[in-house]
Image (tube, grey):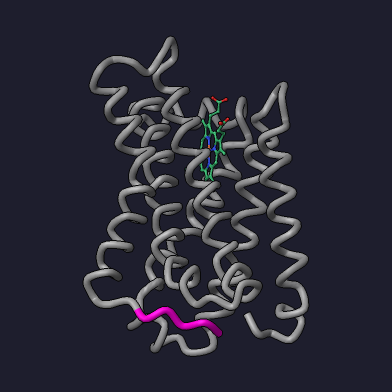
Amino acid sequence: MTVFRFSKRQWFVLKLLVFMLCLWPFLSISWDAFNDALGADPIQRLHFVTGDWALRFLLISLTMSPLSQVFKLPLPIRFRRMLGLFSFFYASLHALVWLVLDQSLSLDNMLNELPESPYIILGFIAYLMLWPLALTSNIIAMRALGSKWHSLHRSVYVIAVVGLVHFFWLTKLDISEPLIYAAVLVLLLMFRWPLFKKKLV
Ligand code: HEM
């Protein structure tokens, strides 16, 4: 495996660059919100941007180990945790937009909405499943959980499937975007399947 020797300073700059790139959708949507430029339906725009990026970062984080393996580079895998946590960050914003802006934190509103939009239940399930992964994505939890850590973090593939079904379900006309994400997920699963069988990931 090719080992790049980054100095501490280079490594810090690279991490900061990736961090700022990941934060870009948030900064961009905040700028639009601040300037009253979210369009005709601001809440829907917030739903779309945060939901899209939650799913995109989830899938991008999953491509890191295959990239490392195929190109024999250790670098991508070192960004996996940050990318996964950004998925959780955007999913949390996405959930908050619904809970606070859409439903005004009213349980009555939520209970009325759920039978009309059952795909939201799937969104909730995916979001709740992200919590244990976010909470255990640190070295202390990794050491404490040992081999159970890998079993727990394998559930990220289930979360991606649930998130995708949520997306397909709510999409009424053009399904090209969820189809692209589904194709990426199928490729990732095909790549990981031999390792799953051997319980190596
Ligand atoms: C509490 C959890 C969640 C709730 C309440 C929720 C709710 C919603 C709502 C209301 C929409 C907009 C539907 C519309 O206006 O037509 C939406 C869209 C979306 N959600 Fe969620 N969701 C949740 C969790 C998630 C999670 C965890 C993911 C991804 C991992 C996700 C991915 C998406 C995507 C990709 C879209 C569509 C964006 C687009 O059309 O461009 N959601 N969700």
Closest to the observer: 55 or 113? 55
Q: Is residue 195 magenta?
A: no
Where is residue 84, by image quadrant?
Answer: bottom left
* Residue 72 image offset from top left, x and y in percent: 59, 78
Closest to the observer: 156 or 27? 27
Predominant secondary structure, magenta span: loop
Name the residue rendered at 37%, 41% in the picture. Answer: 93
Name the residue rendered at 72%, 30% in the picture. Answer: 175
Give the number of callouts: 0
Q: Is residue 4 magenta?
A: yes
Name the residue rendered at 50%, 51% in the picture. Answer: 57
Apparent side of residue 190 relative to residue 150 in the rendered image (left or right)? right
Closest to the observer: 116 or 80? 80
Q: Considering the image in quadrants, where does the N terminus appear? A: bottom right
Vertical position of residue 53 compared to residue 63: above or below: above
Q: Considering the image in quadrants, where does the C terminus appear? A: bottom right
Where is residue 71, by image quadrant?
Answer: bottom right
Closest to the observer: 93 or 64? 64
* Residue 4 image offset from top left, x and y in percent: 42, 79
Apparent side of residue 149 relative to residue 89 in the rendered image (left or right)? right
Name the residue rendered at 31%, 23% in the picture. Answer: 32
Apparent side of residue 66 relative to residue 96 in the rendered image (left or right)? right
Q: Which residues are magenta?
A: 1-5
